[in-house]
Amino acid sequence: MESFIFYLYGAIFIVTGYFVLIFIFDLLLRGFSPFIPSRPWVVEQLMPEIILPTNKPIKLVAFSSGRSGFFKTLGEKYPNAELIGYENAVFPYLVAKTQAFLRRSRIQIRYSVIHRMDVHDADFIYCHLRPDKMRGLGKKLKFECKTGTIVISTGFVIPYLESNRIIELPDKEGRFAFLSKNQDLFQKKNKKFKKEKKAFFYEI
């Protein structure tokens, strides 16, 4: 019994420590606060560009949806839609599950690797993944998605898919931007993947 309690407290400590580290990283190095809808100007720019059917049930899928204010807002725009958020790593999955519970969100958070994520009946897919996490994703979407599925990727293009529209997403100051004036000191000058301030639209 004592060993069980020891492991339980250890797990709680690790999860709590992870949340704290994420909070500090986002707050100090990225200029926005985690655990609340982030970058509202991105949401404001993207939302009017998305037009989905309202006369039938639709399915909205997000890859890496843990702290996505965009996906949450999209669910509010389409209250009858089924919302599924996939995470392919354990800690982001736990974060997403916790936040969905705390916010009483109707987003169904699922843990799955990219190649096993179910997209065959998705009407809309939101992708917030780095290129190294998108290997094979373009081919998967081409092969498995139904005709007419809309896909949006923010920051990076999806390999093997040809975008039909690109929207610029210029930066604006976040509410905690004053804390991130020296963020470049903590980030590598030559990143392996350069994130673009754009949203890439695709239609399968």
Image (tube, rainbow, N blue to C red):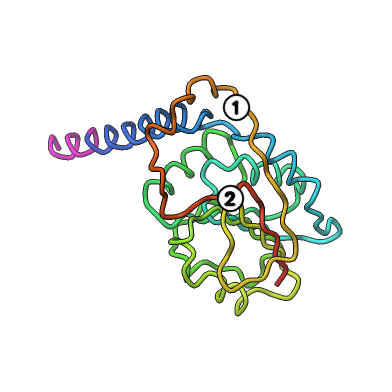
Disc 2 is placed on an element classified as loop
The amino acid type found where label 1 is placed reads: Gly
Numbered circle sitting on residue 57: none
Q: Residue at x 56, y 51 (%)?
A: 108
The picture places residue 174, in percent across and down from the top left corner, at: 60, 27
Pointer 2: what residue? Answer: 196
The picture places residue 161, in percent across and down from the top left corner, at: 63, 71
Magenta-drawn segment: 1-9
Q: Residue at x 68, y 44 (%)?
A: 169
Q: Furthest-right residue in view? A: 55
Name the one closer to the observer, 193 or 68: 193
Q: Furthest-top residue in view? A: 178
Q: Residue at x 76, y 49 (%)?
A: 78
Q: Along the horizontal axis of the image, is 127 left or right of 113?
A: right
Name the one closer to the observer, 11 or 203: 203
Q: Residues within 10 Å of mark 2 (few under 14, many from 20)?
A: some
What is the spatial separation of the Cα atoms under label 1 and label 2, in whole angstroms? Answer: 18 Å
The picture places residue 73, in percent across and down from the top left corner, at: 69, 41
> Which marked residue is nearer to the observer: mark 1 or mark 2?
2
Name the one closer to the observer, 182 or 152: 182
Hey, which quadrant is residue 105 in on the image? Answer: top right
Name the one closer to the observer, 117 or 34: 34
Sequence-first disc among 1 and 2: 1
Disc 1 is placed on an element classified as loop
Residue 28 is a magenta residue: no
Q: Residue at x 62, y 46 (%)?
A: 197
> If the image is split into quadrants, where does the C terminus sit?
bottom right
Q: Along the horizontal axis of the image, is 58 left or right of 72?
A: right
Q: Look at the magenta stretch and give its main secondary structure.
A: helix
Numbered circle sitting on residue 174: 1
